Image (cartoon, rainbow, N blue to C red):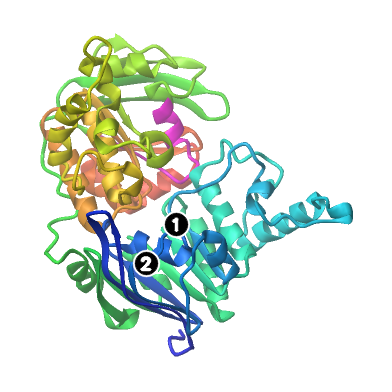
Amino acid sequence: MNTSGPVALQLEQVRKSFGPVVALRSGSLTVHSGSIHALVGENGAGKSTLVKIIAGLYQRDGGEFLLHGKSVDFSSTAASKDAGIAVIYQEPTLFPDLSVTENLFMGRQPLGAGRRIDRKAMHAEARSLFKRLGVNLDPRRLAEGLSIADQQIIEIAKAISLDASVLIMDEPTAALSGVEVDRLFAVARSLRDEGRALVFISHRFEEVFALCDMVTVMRDGEYISTDPIAETTSAQIVAKMVGREVSDLFPKTPASIGAPVLQVSNLERAGVFHDVSFEVRSGEIVALAGLVGAGRSEIARAVFGVDPYDSGTVVLGGTKVPARNPRAAIRLGMGFVPEDRRQQGLVVDASVAHNVAAVIRGKLAKLGLITRAAENRAAGPWSGRLEVKTNALSMNAATMSGGNQQKVVIAKWLATDPKLLIIDEPTRGIDVGTKSEVHRLISELAGQGMAILMISSELPEVLGMADRVLVVNEGRITADIDRADATPESVMTAATNAGASA
């Protein structure tokens, strides 16, 4: 570990407001070359705003911003990149209609004879980057249809290709498997050893302690502390982050398990999932667990009707749900919180009220018109119950933290009063305090009789919240484990061994 190298990046008492909303009161961060520096805090703590100032998306209202000892204030993302700063954001930002290579080199394509784009050189460089990361991605394939894990790998490769002196990674591992995380950490350490400065933003403390040299804590838009990672503990960091004691992270309360609400029988889609059968009962939380790419999300999307399936049946509340018909699924009482909240769960350029009322707009219309007041009346109670941190229901969803965006998506589906809620990665990219709130909400909903189907890549979340764990491996359910029998060993054994039986 090297925390005594020259200071690469320094922000002191940085301030930023958006109208009456104060996003940063006193943001401070000092990162040395040759070190990996963790930046942690609850969603809404100001981390993303600070990063966007560094990236040139926002300009500070006050405070100091130094890069390698020189005062800077970037007016654009291009200026930040030109200065040697690369940022990997929490949510992938690829162009789906372009190839993997074209996304990697957007705006900086190598030119050959006649100043024409040298595609051969681009593909060769892309293959070299993926080889360095240890992944097998076809540089020529379209970005459309790639998993979030693959999209994140492309973003990481793009940042590395810029040869930046300062690399900021905002939740880069949120959608990666354990093997992919280990691979990323190896790359990060090699970049640190080359003398680069890295900022690592994560809500996973085991990653922070495994990778980072220093940790800076922010809370409510303010700098709280900076400590060597070897001289602090996760409990101390949590206490600084939340400014309060966080109750049990998995507040699972006993629920009365009733009759089956969802019954899936022999669901099949060639090359994706095979002979999938299970049920979810009233008051029950059932988790779909397994490694990234096992087919968990694909099963959930087929049940809801977003994706097709070749054969099998889905029954909700005793009524068969038509295939490939989300509207019918919603009418019958199914809600679906998707894995990618920004691309699939939100209209990011619309207000909180508009988003929460989106699925029930037909009920709000009078003479074919929907008023803002009607949206506010529908959205208000759910936004309040989920404690969405916003000054007004008219606030644009794009300006909110990831945790609050997730709450808005959940509120949207709860407003439909569903019998079954499918929730894919409920706490991906969410801070520890908000995780506890989301877990408590899920437990309360189950306690009120709602059936919950939860997909999660976080094993502690699966073990802490589920009444039953369905383990998926290569598109098949390889184990059905009761809560009392679910252990890390039993789940991982089923997740890594195709053909294991329940």
Residue at label 2?
60
Instruction: Give the residue at mark 1.
Output: 173
In this view of the protein, can residue 481 be seen by the observer?
A: no
Q: CA distance from mark 2 to mark 1?
A: 28 Å
- Examine the rendered structure and indicate whether residue 388 appears above or below residue 24: above
Assess disc 1: are there few (<14), some (14-19) or many (≥20) residues with their C-alpha within 10 Å of its C-alpha.
many
Q: Position of residue 284 (x, y in %)?
A: 20, 32
Q: Residue at x 56, y 68 (%)?
A: 187
- Quarter where residue 141 is shown: top right
Q: Using the image, determine if residue 371 lies above or below residue 213.
A: above
Residue at 47% x, 45% y is 292
Residue 234's label in the rendered image is: none
Quadrant where the N terminus sits is: bottom left
Q: Secondary structure at mark 2?
A: loop
Residue that protrudes farthest toward the bottom in the picture: 4
Residue 484 within the segment the image draws in magenta: no
Counting from the top left corner in percent of width and height, residue 320 is at 33, 10
Looking at the picture, tell me which residue is in the foreground, 232 or 379.
379
The magenta region covers: 285-301
Q: Nearer the viewer, residue 392 or 297?
A: 392
x, y percentage for residue 296? 42, 36
Residue 72 in picture, x, y percent from top left: 47, 75
Which residue is located at x 68 percent, y 49 percent?
A: 101
Closer mark to the observer between disc 2 and disc 1: 2
Left or right placement of residue 89 versus residue 227 in this view: right
What residue appears at the point 39 percent right and 30 percent down from the top-left corner?
300
Front residue (pair 205, 172): 172
**Quadrant the C terminus occupies:** top left
Q: Residues within 10 Å of mark 2 (few under 14, many from 20)?
A: many
Q: Secondary structure at mark 1?
A: loop
